[in-house]
Amino acid sequence: MDLKTKLAILADAAKYDASCASSGTDKRDSKGKSGIGSTEGMGICHSYAPDGRCISLLKILLTNACAFDCLYCVNRASSNVPRARFTVDEVVTLTLDFYKRNYIEGLFLSSGIIRSADYTMEQIVEVARKLREENGFRGYIHLKTIPDADERLLAEAGRHADRLSINIELPSETSVAELAPEKDVRAIRRSMGRMRLKIDEAREEKKAPRFSPAGQSTQMIVGADGASDADILETSTNLYGAYRLKRVYYSAFSPIPDASSRLPASAPPLLREHRLYQGDWLLRFYGFDVAEIFAETEGMLPLDMDPKLAWALRQRARFPLDVNTASREELLRVPGFGVRTVERILLARRHHAVRAEDLKRLRVPLKTALPFIVLPDHRPTQLLDRSDLASLIAPAPPQQLDMFAHAA
Protein backbone atom coordinates (compact mmCIF):
# COMPACT_ATOMS: atom_id res chain seq x y z
CA MET A 1 0.00 0.00 0.00
CA ASP A 2 1.43 3.40 -0.95
CA LEU A 3 1.95 6.20 1.56
CA LYS A 4 -0.81 8.40 0.15
CA THR A 5 -3.40 5.65 0.60
CA LYS A 6 -2.20 4.95 4.14
CA LEU A 7 -2.47 8.63 4.96
CA ALA A 8 -6.03 8.81 3.64
CA ILE A 9 -7.12 5.82 5.74
CA LEU A 10 -5.29 6.68 8.95
CA ALA A 11 -6.06 10.40 8.95
CA ASP A 12 -9.74 9.61 8.46
CA ALA A 13 -9.62 6.99 11.24
CA ALA A 14 -8.19 9.57 13.66
CA LYS A 15 -11.01 12.10 13.21
CA TYR A 16 -13.11 10.59 16.00
CA ASP A 17 -10.60 11.60 18.67
CA ALA A 18 -11.28 15.17 19.81
CA SER A 19 -8.63 15.42 22.52
CA CYS A 20 -5.92 17.23 20.60
CA ALA A 21 -5.94 20.95 21.34
CA SER A 22 -2.35 22.20 21.52
CA SER A 23 -1.93 24.79 24.21
CA GLY A 24 -0.11 25.30 27.48
CA THR A 25 3.26 23.99 26.44
CA ASP A 26 6.61 25.81 26.56
CA LYS A 27 9.50 26.30 24.14
CA ARG A 28 12.01 23.52 23.63
CA ASP A 29 15.71 24.14 23.96
CA SER A 30 17.86 22.55 21.27
CA LYS A 31 20.96 22.94 23.49
CA GLY A 32 22.75 25.16 21.02
CA LYS A 33 21.83 23.07 17.99
CA SER A 34 19.63 24.16 15.15
CA GLY A 35 16.18 22.60 15.22
CA ILE A 36 13.03 22.21 13.21
CA GLY A 37 9.58 23.41 14.19
CA SER A 38 7.97 25.55 16.81
CA THR A 39 5.07 25.30 19.25
CA GLU A 40 4.01 28.86 18.37
CA GLY A 41 2.40 30.61 15.43
CA MET A 42 -0.62 30.16 13.20
CA GLY A 43 -1.38 27.51 10.63
CA ILE A 44 -3.93 25.32 8.94
CA CYS A 45 -6.94 24.84 11.18
CA HIS A 46 -6.87 21.24 12.33
CA SER A 47 -7.59 22.07 15.95
CA TYR A 48 -8.35 24.94 18.30
CA ALA A 49 -6.57 25.90 21.48
CA PRO A 50 -8.85 26.87 24.39
CA ASP A 51 -8.00 30.54 23.80
CA GLY A 52 -9.37 30.31 20.25
CA ARG A 53 -6.11 30.10 18.28
CA CYS A 54 -6.03 27.86 15.23
CA ILE A 55 -3.44 25.12 15.60
CA SER A 56 -2.35 22.95 12.69
CA LEU A 57 -1.66 19.35 13.57
CA LEU A 58 -0.95 16.24 11.57
CA LYS A 59 -3.56 14.05 13.27
CA ILE A 60 -3.17 10.37 12.42
CA LEU A 61 -3.21 6.85 13.79
CA LEU A 62 -0.11 4.70 13.66
CA THR A 63 -2.52 1.93 12.66
CA ASN A 64 -6.28 1.43 12.66
CA ALA A 65 -5.87 -2.30 13.26
CA CYS A 66 -6.86 -3.12 16.83
CA ALA A 67 -7.06 -6.17 19.04
CA PHE A 68 -9.87 -4.58 21.09
CA ASP A 69 -13.52 -4.85 20.08
CA CYS A 70 -15.07 -1.72 21.62
CA LEU A 71 -18.60 -1.61 20.24
CA TYR A 72 -18.65 2.15 19.60
CA CYS A 73 -15.36 2.22 17.68
CA VAL A 74 -15.22 2.07 13.89
CA ASN A 75 -11.74 0.54 14.16
CA ARG A 76 -12.79 -2.29 16.48
CA ALA A 77 -11.44 -5.77 15.76
CA SER A 78 -14.71 -6.98 14.23
CA SER A 79 -15.22 -3.92 12.03
CA ASN A 80 -15.13 -4.38 8.27
CA VAL A 81 -13.01 -1.36 7.35
CA PRO A 82 -9.84 -1.03 5.26
CA ARG A 83 -6.78 -1.44 7.48
CA ALA A 84 -3.45 0.31 7.21
CA ARG A 85 -0.31 0.79 9.24
CA PHE A 86 2.50 3.30 9.14
CA THR A 87 6.07 2.43 10.00
CA VAL A 88 7.79 4.64 12.53
CA ASP A 89 9.97 6.18 9.84
CA GLU A 90 6.96 6.96 7.65
CA VAL A 91 5.32 8.99 10.44
CA VAL A 92 8.58 10.83 11.11
CA THR A 93 9.02 11.62 7.42
CA LEU A 94 5.42 12.78 7.00
CA THR A 95 5.63 15.06 10.04
CA LEU A 96 8.85 16.70 8.89
CA ASP A 97 7.74 17.04 5.26
CA PHE A 98 4.37 18.55 6.25
CA TYR A 99 6.07 20.96 8.62
CA LYS A 100 8.61 22.11 6.03
CA ARG A 101 5.73 22.82 3.65
CA ASN A 102 4.09 24.92 6.39
CA TYR A 103 1.06 22.61 6.50
CA ILE A 104 1.34 21.80 10.23
CA GLU A 105 2.82 22.94 13.50
CA GLY A 106 2.80 19.61 15.26
CA LEU A 107 1.75 15.98 15.49
CA PHE A 108 -1.14 14.22 17.21
CA LEU A 109 -0.43 10.48 17.21
CA SER A 110 -2.70 7.71 18.41
CA SER A 111 -3.02 4.05 17.50
CA GLY A 112 -5.06 0.91 17.69
CA ILE A 113 -3.68 -1.81 19.95
CA ILE A 114 -1.41 -4.15 17.98
CA ARG A 115 0.33 -7.25 19.41
CA SER A 116 0.31 -5.82 22.96
CA ALA A 117 0.01 -2.58 24.89
CA ASP A 118 3.79 -2.43 25.38
CA TYR A 119 4.58 -3.04 21.70
CA THR A 120 2.10 -0.37 20.59
CA MET A 121 3.44 2.14 23.11
CA GLU A 122 7.02 1.39 22.06
CA GLN A 123 6.16 2.30 18.46
CA ILE A 124 4.44 5.54 19.47
CA VAL A 125 7.33 6.57 21.71
CA GLU A 126 9.88 5.73 19.01
CA VAL A 127 8.19 8.18 16.63
CA ALA A 128 8.49 10.97 19.21
CA ARG A 129 12.08 10.01 20.11
CA LYS A 130 13.23 10.09 16.49
CA LEU A 131 11.57 13.44 15.88
CA ARG A 132 13.14 14.99 18.97
CA GLU A 133 16.56 13.38 19.23
CA GLU A 134 17.47 12.52 15.64
CA ASN A 135 15.76 15.38 13.79
CA GLY A 136 15.73 18.21 16.33
CA PHE A 137 11.94 18.71 16.00
CA ARG A 138 10.74 21.35 18.43
CA GLY A 139 7.12 21.51 17.32
CA TYR A 140 4.15 20.33 19.32
CA ILE A 141 3.71 16.58 19.93
CA HIS A 142 0.61 15.07 21.52
CA LEU A 143 0.74 11.33 22.16
CA LYS A 144 -2.18 9.08 23.00
CA THR A 145 -0.90 6.69 25.65
CA ILE A 146 -1.85 3.07 26.29
CA PRO A 147 -2.83 2.68 29.97
CA ASP A 148 -1.74 -0.96 30.26
CA ALA A 149 1.75 -0.20 28.92
CA ASP A 150 4.85 -0.44 31.06
CA GLU A 151 5.41 2.58 33.30
CA ARG A 152 8.88 3.05 31.79
CA LEU A 153 7.31 3.62 28.37
CA LEU A 154 4.80 6.13 29.74
CA ALA A 155 7.66 8.00 31.41
CA GLU A 156 9.61 8.14 28.15
CA ALA A 157 6.52 9.34 26.30
CA GLY A 158 6.22 12.23 28.75
CA ARG A 159 9.81 13.30 28.16
CA HIS A 160 9.25 13.71 24.43
CA ALA A 161 5.61 14.83 24.26
CA ASP A 162 4.13 18.23 25.04
CA ARG A 163 0.84 16.64 26.05
CA LEU A 164 -0.29 13.11 26.85
CA SER A 165 -3.81 11.78 26.89
CA ILE A 166 -5.63 8.61 27.89
CA ASN A 167 -9.25 8.39 26.80
CA ILE A 168 -11.64 7.27 29.50
CA GLU A 169 -14.26 7.06 26.70
CA LEU A 170 -17.44 6.68 28.79
CA PRO A 171 -18.53 8.34 32.04
CA SER A 172 -19.31 5.20 34.05
CA GLU A 173 -17.46 1.99 34.77
CA THR A 174 -20.67 0.08 34.00
CA SER A 175 -20.85 1.54 30.48
CA VAL A 176 -17.19 0.76 29.82
CA ALA A 177 -17.70 -2.84 30.95
CA GLU A 178 -20.70 -3.21 28.64
CA LEU A 179 -19.40 -1.45 25.51
CA ALA A 180 -15.61 -1.84 25.83
CA PRO A 181 -15.06 -4.99 27.94
CA GLU A 182 -11.31 -5.23 27.18
CA LYS A 183 -10.70 -1.80 28.72
CA ASP A 184 -9.98 -1.48 32.43
CA VAL A 185 -11.20 1.79 33.98
CA ARG A 186 -9.02 1.22 37.04
CA ALA A 187 -5.93 0.84 34.84
CA ILE A 188 -6.83 4.06 33.01
CA ARG A 189 -7.18 5.94 36.28
CA ARG A 190 -3.94 4.46 37.65
CA SER A 191 -2.10 5.70 34.57
CA MET A 192 -3.69 9.15 34.91
CA GLY A 193 -2.55 9.20 38.54
CA ARG A 194 1.02 8.27 37.61
CA MET A 195 1.10 10.96 34.94
CA ARG A 196 -0.19 13.57 37.36
CA LEU A 197 2.58 12.72 39.83
CA LYS A 198 5.28 12.96 37.16
CA ILE A 199 3.89 16.24 35.79
CA ASP A 200 3.73 17.69 39.32
CA GLU A 201 7.28 16.56 40.08
CA ALA A 202 8.62 18.14 36.89
CA ARG A 203 6.94 21.45 37.70
CA GLU A 204 7.96 21.57 41.35
CA GLU A 205 11.59 20.50 40.98
CA LYS A 206 13.67 22.82 38.84
CA LYS A 207 16.23 20.13 38.04
CA ALA A 208 13.66 17.45 37.22
CA PRO A 209 13.47 16.36 33.56
CA ARG A 210 10.61 17.99 31.67
CA PHE A 211 7.50 15.84 31.53
CA SER A 212 4.44 16.60 29.39
CA PRO A 213 4.55 20.37 30.05
CA ALA A 214 1.09 20.91 28.52
CA GLY A 215 -0.39 18.37 30.94
CA GLN A 216 -2.79 15.55 30.17
CA SER A 217 -6.28 15.34 28.72
CA THR A 218 -9.00 12.79 28.07
CA GLN A 219 -12.13 12.28 26.00
CA MET A 220 -15.64 11.06 26.70
CA ILE A 221 -18.06 9.89 24.04
CA VAL A 222 -21.47 11.53 24.32
CA GLY A 223 -24.61 9.60 23.46
CA ALA A 224 -23.25 6.05 23.13
CA ASP A 225 -24.77 5.03 26.45
CA GLY A 226 -27.62 6.25 28.63
CA ALA A 227 -25.54 8.67 30.70
CA SER A 228 -27.15 12.04 31.36
CA ASP A 229 -25.34 15.36 30.99
CA ALA A 230 -25.20 15.51 34.80
CA ASP A 231 -23.47 12.09 34.88
CA ILE A 232 -20.94 13.23 32.29
CA LEU A 233 -20.08 16.51 34.01
CA GLU A 234 -19.93 14.81 37.42
CA THR A 235 -17.30 12.44 36.01
CA SER A 236 -15.43 15.39 34.47
CA THR A 237 -15.40 17.21 37.81
CA ASN A 238 -13.89 14.15 39.45
CA LEU A 239 -11.25 13.84 36.72
CA TYR A 240 -10.26 17.50 36.94
CA GLY A 241 -9.95 17.29 40.72
CA ALA A 242 -8.20 13.94 41.00
CA TYR A 243 -5.78 14.20 38.08
CA ARG A 244 -5.56 17.93 37.29
CA LEU A 245 -6.47 17.34 33.66
CA LYS A 246 -6.01 20.24 31.29
CA ARG A 247 -9.15 19.36 29.38
CA VAL A 248 -11.92 16.84 29.15
CA TYR A 249 -13.11 16.67 25.56
CA TYR A 250 -16.61 15.63 24.56
CA SER A 251 -17.15 13.78 21.30
CA ALA A 252 -20.66 13.11 20.03
CA PHE A 253 -21.22 9.43 19.26
CA SER A 254 -21.20 8.75 15.54
CA PRO A 255 -23.15 5.69 14.30
CA ILE A 256 -20.88 3.17 12.61
CA PRO A 257 -21.46 0.43 10.02
CA ASP A 258 -22.63 -2.96 11.31
CA ALA A 259 -23.15 -1.51 14.77
CA SER A 260 -24.26 -3.51 17.78
CA SER A 261 -27.93 -3.35 18.74
CA ARG A 262 -26.77 -2.07 22.14
CA LEU A 263 -25.76 1.23 20.51
CA PRO A 264 -28.16 4.05 19.59
CA ALA A 265 -29.38 4.01 16.00
CA SER A 266 -28.72 7.73 15.54
CA ALA A 267 -26.22 10.31 16.72
CA PRO A 268 -27.10 12.74 19.51
CA PRO A 269 -27.62 16.38 18.52
CA LEU A 270 -24.27 18.06 17.96
CA LEU A 271 -25.65 20.90 20.04
CA ARG A 272 -25.55 18.58 23.06
CA GLU A 273 -21.78 18.36 22.72
CA HIS A 274 -21.67 22.16 22.56
CA ARG A 275 -23.75 22.54 25.73
CA LEU A 276 -21.49 20.12 27.59
CA TYR A 277 -18.48 22.27 26.75
CA GLN A 278 -20.36 25.30 28.07
CA GLY A 279 -21.27 23.41 31.24
CA ASP A 280 -17.66 22.32 31.60
CA TRP A 281 -16.59 25.97 31.34
CA LEU A 282 -19.06 26.97 34.08
CA LEU A 283 -17.56 24.35 36.39
CA ARG A 284 -13.94 25.29 35.71
CA PHE A 285 -14.02 29.08 35.43
CA TYR A 286 -17.33 30.44 36.71
CA GLY A 287 -17.63 28.92 40.17
CA PHE A 288 -20.59 26.64 39.51
CA ASP A 289 -20.97 23.08 40.73
CA VAL A 290 -22.82 20.24 39.06
CA ALA A 291 -25.71 20.23 41.53
CA GLU A 292 -26.70 23.85 40.90
CA ILE A 293 -26.34 23.63 37.12
CA PHE A 294 -28.82 20.76 37.10
CA ALA A 295 -31.08 21.89 39.95
CA GLU A 296 -34.76 21.57 39.00
CA THR A 297 -33.85 19.69 35.83
CA GLU A 298 -33.83 16.03 34.86
CA GLY A 299 -30.07 15.90 34.42
CA MET A 300 -29.94 17.25 30.87
CA LEU A 301 -28.77 20.65 29.66
CA PRO A 302 -31.33 22.55 27.57
CA LEU A 303 -30.54 22.65 23.88
CA ASP A 304 -32.36 25.93 23.21
CA MET A 305 -30.14 28.15 25.38
CA ASP A 306 -26.78 28.09 27.14
CA PRO A 307 -26.70 26.57 30.66
CA LYS A 308 -25.80 29.83 32.42
CA LEU A 309 -28.83 31.57 30.98
CA ALA A 310 -31.04 28.60 31.85
CA TRP A 311 -29.70 28.68 35.42
CA ALA A 312 -30.32 32.44 35.72
CA LEU A 313 -33.93 32.06 34.64
CA ARG A 314 -34.44 29.53 37.43
CA GLN A 315 -32.80 31.89 39.95
CA ARG A 316 -34.86 35.04 39.44
CA ALA A 317 -34.52 36.08 43.10
CA ARG A 318 -30.79 36.70 42.57
CA PHE A 319 -31.40 39.29 39.86
CA PRO A 320 -31.11 42.03 38.80
CA LEU A 321 -27.57 42.64 40.07
CA ASP A 322 -26.02 46.08 40.46
CA VAL A 323 -22.92 45.87 38.26
CA ASN A 324 -21.15 48.55 40.30
CA THR A 325 -21.52 46.84 43.69
CA ALA A 326 -21.81 43.11 42.96
CA SER A 327 -18.91 40.80 43.84
CA ARG A 328 -16.76 39.08 41.25
CA GLU A 329 -18.49 35.78 42.02
CA GLU A 330 -21.91 37.33 41.44
CA LEU A 331 -20.88 39.03 38.20
CA LEU A 332 -19.55 35.75 36.80
CA ARG A 333 -23.11 34.41 36.99
CA VAL A 334 -24.64 37.13 34.86
CA PRO A 335 -25.66 35.79 31.41
CA GLY A 336 -23.51 37.42 28.76
CA PHE A 337 -20.58 38.19 31.09
CA GLY A 338 -17.40 36.23 30.39
CA VAL A 339 -14.38 35.95 32.69
CA ARG A 340 -12.41 38.67 30.89
CA THR A 341 -15.44 40.94 30.83
CA VAL A 342 -15.85 40.62 34.60
CA GLU A 343 -12.17 41.40 35.20
CA ARG A 344 -12.44 44.52 33.03
CA ILE A 345 -15.61 45.65 34.80
CA LEU A 346 -13.91 45.30 38.18
CA LEU A 347 -10.96 47.32 36.91
CA ALA A 348 -13.14 50.02 35.34
CA ARG A 349 -15.38 50.58 38.34
CA ARG A 350 -12.38 51.54 40.49
CA HIS A 351 -12.33 54.77 38.54
CA HIS A 352 -15.94 55.45 37.56
CA ALA A 353 -19.41 53.98 37.57
CA VAL A 354 -19.87 51.42 34.80
CA ARG A 355 -22.66 52.34 32.41
CA ALA A 356 -24.35 50.64 29.46
CA GLU A 357 -22.01 52.35 27.01
CA ASP A 358 -19.02 50.85 28.83
CA LEU A 359 -20.48 47.36 28.48
CA LYS A 360 -21.11 47.99 24.81
CA ARG A 361 -17.43 48.87 24.35
CA LEU A 362 -16.55 45.61 26.11
CA ARG A 363 -18.68 43.83 23.49
CA VAL A 364 -21.09 42.44 26.05
CA PRO A 365 -24.23 41.03 24.36
CA LEU A 366 -26.55 43.62 25.89
CA LYS A 367 -29.78 41.93 24.84
CA THR A 368 -28.77 38.96 26.96
CA ALA A 369 -27.25 40.81 29.92
CA LEU A 370 -29.50 43.86 30.45
CA PRO A 371 -32.52 41.98 31.86
CA PHE A 372 -30.28 40.72 34.69
CA ILE A 373 -28.37 43.87 35.71
CA VAL A 374 -28.77 47.37 37.12
CA LEU A 375 -26.67 50.29 35.85
CA PRO A 376 -26.81 54.06 36.53
CA ASP A 377 -28.55 54.46 33.18
CA HIS A 378 -30.48 51.19 33.12
CA ARG A 379 -32.92 49.34 35.31
CA PRO A 380 -34.93 46.44 33.85
CA THR A 381 -38.69 46.88 34.14
CA GLN A 382 -39.13 43.12 34.48
CA LEU A 383 -37.08 39.96 34.11
CA LEU A 384 -37.96 38.37 30.79
CA ASP A 385 -39.21 34.82 30.83
CA ARG A 386 -37.66 31.82 29.08
CA SER A 387 -39.60 32.21 25.85
CA ASP A 388 -38.67 35.90 25.55
CA LEU A 389 -34.97 35.30 26.04
CA ALA A 390 -34.73 32.19 23.87
CA SER A 391 -35.57 34.28 20.82
CA LEU A 392 -32.61 36.55 21.56
CA ILE A 393 -29.99 33.80 21.59
CA ALA A 394 -28.27 33.07 18.29
CA PRO A 395 -28.02 29.37 17.43
CA ALA A 396 -24.67 27.71 18.07
CA PRO A 397 -22.37 27.54 15.04
CA PRO A 398 -22.22 24.10 13.40
CA GLN A 399 -18.44 23.89 13.58
CA GLN A 400 -15.89 24.23 16.40
CA LEU A 401 -18.48 24.29 19.16
CA ASP A 402 -16.10 24.22 22.14
CA MET A 403 -14.59 27.69 21.90
CA PHE A 404 -15.88 29.43 24.99
CA ALA A 405 -12.89 31.34 26.35
CA HIS A 406 -14.82 34.59 26.00
CA ALA A 407 -18.38 33.21 25.92
CA ALA A 408 -20.82 32.90 28.76
Image: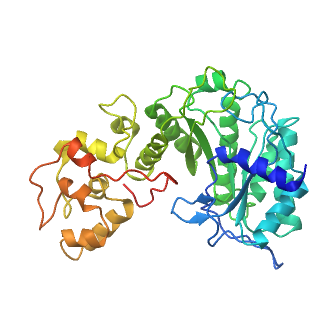
Q: Which color scheme does this rendered protein use?
A: rainbow
- Seen in the picture, residue 328 relative to 277 is either above or below; the reply is below
User: Would residue 354 be seen by someone viewing this image from the given angle?
Assistant: no
Q: Residue at x 91, y 48 (%)?
A: 1
Pick the residue in front: 60 or 142.
Answer: 60
Give the x, y percent position of residue 154: 78, 46
Q: Is residue 228 visible?
A: yes
Point 19% across, 64% down: residue: 324
Q: Quick one: quadrant of the C terminus?
A: bottom left
The location of residue 135, given as percent across then percent down, is: 86, 68
Left or right side of 151 for 44: left
Query: What is the number of callouts on the image?
Result: 0
Q: Position of residue 242 (x, y in %)?
A: 56, 41
- Give left or right: position of 316 versus 12: left
**Rendered image quadrant of residue 336:** bottom left
The extreme left residue here reads: 381
Eyeballing the image, is 391 above or below 365? above
In this rendering, position of residue 328 left or right of residue 83: left
Q: Nearer the viewer, residue 131 or 224?
A: 224
Residue 396, how many percent across, how many down? Answer: 41, 51
Of 341 and 6, the residue lying toward us = 6
